[in-house]
Amino acid sequence: MSFVLFVVYILCTYLRPFEMFAPALNEYRPMLILLALALVPAVMRAVMRNEAGARAVHFGLLGLFVLAIGVSQVANQWAGGALVSIADFSASAILMVLCFLNLTSIRRLQVTCVAIVASAVLLAALGIYSFHTGFMAEQLVLRQNPTDDEALESVDIVDTNPIPAQDTSGRYFLRLRSLGFLNDPNDLAQFMVMVLPLLWWAHAPGRWIRNLFVLGVPGVLLGYAIYLTQSRGALLGVAAVLLMAAHRFLGTIKTMVLMFLATAAMGIISFGGRELSTSEESAAQRIDAWYAGWTMLKAKPLFGVGYGNFLDYHNLTAHNSFVLCFSELGLFGYFAWLGLIVLTFLGLNRAIQLAPHNTPERRLTVMLRASLVAYLACAWFLSRTYQPGLYVVLALCISAWVCVQKLAAPNTSPVLQEALPWPKPTLMAMFISIAAVYLFIAAQRLIG
């Protein structure tokens, strides 16, 4: 029963049925009630069985990150803001813990992935239907002022067609979105890009009719919906997935050449009328925001400027999840956040080594790694450090490693049984990512 409630909660988290079809119920906090109903039995089951889809180090890093959020406010002379900030992030943290408590077997992980994929396909279908018919268009289609790339509030519909697909006024960018934490078109696109590799997990060699309906139709829906979001970051996520697939056949050097060519191509094409070049005004403003984050890190390197305080120092958000983290939480919080990501990657790589070839477990683990890469590629140009979506995909990947490790334990070599050496790679990742941000800034200023 606890797992059923968990799956229902995951579906409601993405599909937002209460906001969409029964907004009057929101005053009764149905999602909070559902969370409690799912969390209590999950905790009881985990305690009784001494079982979870994560190790102590994962819980520890998540706890350290929560602590860093609170400390960042205390260090900036707002002790009362520590609890407020932790409470603000608690939805993401609790959701991750809920995943850990429930994803204790490959079967449960598979069912959850299916639920997430189904949620993405349903949102894509509903969004496309809204775009072409006007159904719930005010909620599901953003009319964004083309002269203000940051305006994410719907504007008054004046002299425009209520059916977005038939609006030829040219006054606005029409961008697909959803409700809840997917209300921003970029968030919706990032979620759908993350789902694309999981969809491929269902591929069955030689069964082309089945693949047409199980992969082809949902893939087209997701692809078209991603296009309708007009999210430039989503293109980078899709490119990251394709490059990972190409690496398997082309090798490292040819893949790097392909990556260079793809990056050059993105600099001269547009996406729904929105340029991808760093010389485009909006992109230049984003690089300026990165520079602002860089200066915040230099000014307060240990604990940052405080959770949620980036906009107190710059007029635009960071537009980079990595920059947002190290500027607001300093190196202390950045170590915990990036450590969780690095440890997750190391676990996935270990799981791929452990799982036998041509097994569902190994294929799912490979697809989850691609999903995480896609999500983080999008996050490089989006401020999504604290969003629930990141912590769900991290929990899925961590649980995959733990579950595969349990299955392979009797036949695992002593080397593969060793603990994952994550601290040193995390420090290297911190240095490389901060240096990459600085190189982006330097390149933009050189070009500009």
Image (cartoon, helix red, strand yellow):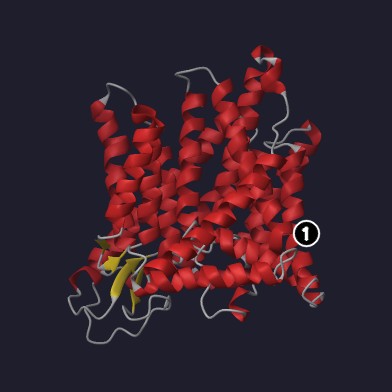
- Say above or below: 170 vs 443: below
- Say above or below: 49 vs 136: above
Relative placement, left or right, of 438 versus 165 is right
Give amino acid for label 1.
Leu
Which residue is at the far front?
A: 446
Q: Residue at x 34, y 27 (%)?
A: 249
Q: Residue at x 46, y 70 (%)?
A: 286
Q: Using a 10 Å C-alpha cutoff, classify the residue at mark 1 as few (fewer than 14 neighbours), some (14 to 19) or many (20 or more).
A: some
Q: Nearer the viewer, residue 54 or 164?
A: 54
Tally of marks = 1
Q: Quadrant of residue 358?
A: top left
Q: Position of residue 299 (x, y in %)?
A: 69, 72
Q: Is residue 353 visible?
A: yes
Q: Is residue 225 visible?
A: no
Q: Position of residue 393 (x, y in %)?
A: 55, 46
Relative placement, left or right, of 91 versus 165 is right
Q: Residue at x 74, y 58 (%)?
A: 332
Q: Secondary structure at mark 1?
A: helix
Which residue is at the far top?
A: 411
Position of the C terminus, as image quadrant, is: bottom left
Position of the N terminus, as image quadrant, is: top right
Q: Nearer the viewer, residue 317 or 251?
A: 251
Relative placement, left or right, of 175 versus 351 is left
Which residue is under mark 1? 67
Q: Position of residue 275 (x, y in %)?
A: 29, 66
- Say above or below: 379 vs 210: below
Q: Quadrant of residue 271?
A: bottom left
Q: Position of residue 102 (x, y in %)?
A: 65, 39
- Say above or below: 401 vs 182: above
Relative placement, left or right, of 443 versus 300 is left
